[in-house]
Image: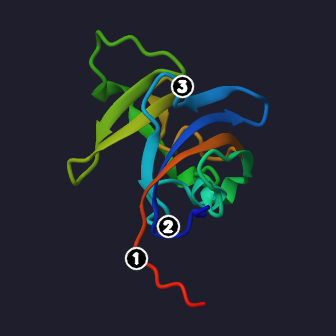
Amino acid sequence: MQQVQSGDTVKVHYHGRLTDGTTFDSSEGRDPLEFQVGSQMVIAGFDNGVMGMVVGDKKTVHIPVDDAYGPKNPDMIIEFPKEQVPADMPLEVGMRLNLNNSQGQVVPVVITEIQETAILLDANHPLAGEDLVFDIELVEIVGAPSRIIMP
């Protein structure tokens, strides 16, 4: 049976959770996730986790912070002046907002603290600083680069 190698395009079903068991994402009820292994389309730990699997294999992969979304970066905490927030906009800790950076790109943020004159916004990925656990099932190896196998 063909094992997954770097460069293969694969389809997987997955269930992602934090180490406390909280689910953060799952492909249940959706089409399998399709990606090219080794192309940095998914986090490194997930990429490495499918290597060597064969169609039908199921496994649980524990991914440390550094192979997931990395540690929380304190430089990604933004102090935003309250005076720049529309007066009729209710603010709550945990609320998700989108800001535009200087290049016009949308940056998702979460309100972490509301102060008298400012709000603190966290622009880190929501899973930054977390070890992750994925249950992975390899559904299909869609395509693989041509390989010459020598006897």
Is residue 38 left or right of 143 when viewed as pictured? Answer: right
Residue type at tag 1: Ser
Farthest residue in the bottom direction? 150
User: Badge 3, how many Cα within 10 Å: few under 14, some, many 20+?
Assistant: few
Report helix, strand or loop for mark 2: loop
Which residue is the site of mark 3? 28
Residue type at tag 2: Gly
Report helix, strand or loop for mark 1: loop
User: Badge 1, how many Cα within 10 Å: few under 14, some, many 20+?
Assistant: few
Return the disc, 2 or 1, that comes first in the chain's sequence: 2
**Relative image position of residue 127 (x, y in whole percent):** 59, 41
Q: Tell me which residue sits at (69%, 53%) in the image.
A: 65
Return the disc, 1 or 3, that comes first in the chain's sequence: 3
Which residue is the site of mark 1? 146
Farthest residue in the right direction? 20
Residues at marks 3 and 2, CA–CA distance in whole angstroms = 24 Å
**Relative image position of residue 32 (x, y in whole percent):** 46, 37
Q: Quadrant of residue 52?
A: bottom right
Which residue is the site of mark 2? 38
Q: Nearer the viewer, mark 1 or mark 3?
A: 1
